[in-house]
Image: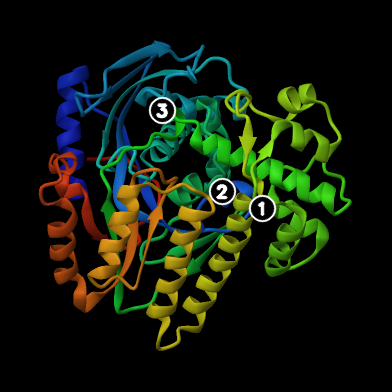
Amino acid sequence: MPDLSERLLKLKEMFNSKFGSTPKFYVRAPGRVNIIGEHIDYCGYSVIPMAVEQDMLIAVEPVKTHTLQLANTDPLYLDFSTTANNICIDKTKPLWHNYFLCGFKGIQEHFGLSKLPGMNCLVDGNIPPSSGLSSSSALVCCAGLVTLTVLGLRLSKVELAEICAKSERYIGTEGGGMDQSISFLAEEGTAKLIEFSPLRATNVKLPSGAVFVIANSCVEMNKAATSHFNVRVMECRLAAKVLAKHKGLQWDNVLRLEEVQSKLGISLEEMLLVTEDGLHPEPYSREEICRCLGISLEKLRTQILTPNTQDELTFKLYQRAKHVYSEAARVLQFKQVCEDAPDNAVQLLGELMNQSHRSCRDMYECSCPELDQLVDICRKFGAKGSRLTGAGWGGCTVSLVPTDMLSSFLASVHEAYYQGNTSCLAREKHSLFATKPGGGALVFREA
């Protein structure tokens, strides 16, 4: 992978040939790998991600017109131009430039600005798209920081992360904020426990003697283009409401499974017992949910379901709640093992990752055959733990591999999964790599 200074110089040259001028500054925002804590950030629970070294990089020149001109170093992504004062984001088309517009609009709305300066931007990314390493959120974060810098305004990293998490919803993705938080709050050399409400980040020192390896299944999953992701968000919301009602709580305003736990004041282990008691494994029809909550079908459709989940006929509440509460407990156990640093830490952390994958596969149903095959291969060739990372339904696995086994592990996984796999050949060098925790988003003044 070319180093940052090489990429910046190349970007400067391409910018000059594209726009006939020189960038005034550059912004970088990293992708991330979620080590443990899958699909629980939007339920209110903590997660443990780390930034990867791959990132989004944008060269920027503010201009006196009110035109926003976006170009991409990858010819697959077409140029886009619009007025900076009337940003429209088409939720039906998750085109690359819409993610930039999310970050731009988020800053604009936060400060209540009507007239914004224009800018020329050239975007370069080396995070594989739709791989579960958060290329889209990195672009939203990059755009937010670009806009803030052009305006000459200041915000804390936490404020920026919260604005960018909220603004990605303009494209229809109901995420929880992990991706944007780690993009801004990451520090080199450490993973982070990211907690929400209020947003805060704590260092998690990973054990020495092992590295994390990313392996891309080469099955692409675009969160904004598919309904799976938003249906899971809604199933968790409905589970929270039904459990709250079951326990005699005021359920109307409950949106997250974590709220039920905090209102009851009980442990995650006890919440798993409440789930067994209050929900059944068979899917719930819309009519049954209405009966449980004592509401009309019309109220369910118009006041609870989102436009992209209104046509769903059944919802699996028990399985989703069971995954969320058990995964939230695994995050806390993972952090504890890292803090205690016992001799068998790598083994213990690996087992937690393996449990996480089983739960994602069986309870949350967000895996796919290729991911399951890749996880099995990684474990077979020496990973102490391996799991899907990111939204799932494709994308990447993350594996915990003893350092002394790394080279044989990479060679064996390459041979078993990638050799002869035609869908992976074009991007093989980006498909299998060891990574260490990288730093967060930055502004550069000079290339």
Q: CA distance from mark 1 to mark 2?
A: 9 Å
Q: Residue furthest front?
A: 282
Are the two marked residues, 1 and 2, in contact with CB atoms closer than 8 angstroms?
yes
Residue 38 position (above or below residue 232): below
Q: Earlier in the sequence, mark 1 or mark 2?
A: 2
**Disc 1, SS:** loop
Q: Front-most of 99 and 429? A: 429
Cα distance in 3D space between marks 1 and 3 = 26 Å
Between residue 200 and residue 262, name the one nearer to us: 262
Residue topped by disc 1: 198
Q: Quadrant of residue 33?
A: bottom left
Amino acid type at mark 3: Phe
Q: Percent position (x, y) of residue 231?
A: 57, 36
Kindly tell me whether residue 357 is visible in this rendering. Answer: yes
Q: Earlier in the sequence, mark 1 or mark 3?
A: 3
SS of the residue at dot 2? helix
Where is residue 258, by image quadrant? Answer: bottom right
The amino acid at mark 1 is: Pro
Residue 177 found in image quarter = top right
Percent x, y for residue 39? 53, 50
Q: Which mark is residue 158?
A: 2
**Residue at point 49%, 18% (across, down):** 116
Callout 3 secondary element: helix
Q: Residues within 10 Å of mark 3 (few under 14, many from 20)?
A: many
Residue 98: % across, % down = 42, 23
Label 3: which residue?
Answer: 100
